[in-house]
Amino acid sequence: MFGFGKKNETKRYGLTGDDDVITTIRKALESNDMKYQYSDDYKMFTVPIQGDDLPIMMNMVVQDAAIHFVCPLALKAEPNNFEKVAWELNGINKTLPFGAFFLDPDEGLISFEYGYIFVETKMSQEFVLSMMKHMVKTVDQHDGDLKKLAEEVSKIPDAMYG
């Protein structure tokens, strides 16, 4: 029996805590010579990655027993195009096995996001790198369609400093 619903005396979130996951992410990035920035205030890693034809900024936020993988894209939709872009993103999202493309209604920026809950699991460096690879692969696979819908912007907004 799995013991679902039973209260246990383990760590607040199970086998792996936020600090353990932060250490695992740091080791995964450093063991692969990946450049990154880290913010203690937000528990967020920011990793610049060059996609096939667009730069991809990978943000990983560790919070409340979850890793939020967020790739803000260098694409911005114009307000008069929001409805069309939202419908197209919805069409793409229906085909994805995980994650989703989002349109920020305030800024018009497009991002790809996925959240992984790590309650009662052991996080590995291999898992972190695999998720990063799948995120980038998904963005690369669909960026051509996205570029047709939105104009490229010259600067990716910095999620850490605004």
Image (cartoon, grey):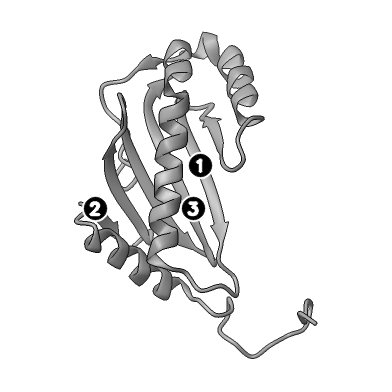
| Distance (Cα) linking label 3 and label 2 | 16 Å
| Distance (Cα) linking label 2 and label 1 | 19 Å
Q: Residues within 10 Å of mark 2 (few under 14, many from 20)?
A: some
Q: Earlier in the sequence, mark 3 or mark 2?
A: 2
**Residue at x 56%, y 41% (from the top left corner):** 99
The image quadrant that residue 162 belongs to is top left
Q: Which mark is residue 66?
A: none
The three-letter code of the residue at mark 2 reads Tyr
Q: Is residue 119 left or right of residue 132?
A: right
Q: Is residue 4 left or right of residue 53?
A: right
Secondary structure under the numbered disc 2 in the rendered image: loop
Give the residue at mark 1.
Answer: 113
The three-letter code of the residue at mark 3 reads His
Q: Which mark is residue 68?
A: 3
Secondary structure under the numbered disc 1 in the rendered image: strand
Q: Position of residue 117 (x, y in %)?
A: 58, 61
- Which residue appears farthest toward the bottom when viewing the image? 9
Are the two marked residues, 3 and 1, in contact with CB atoms closer than 8 angstroms? Answer: yes
Q: Earlier in the sequence, mark 3 or mark 1?
A: 3
Give the residue at mark 2.
Answer: 36
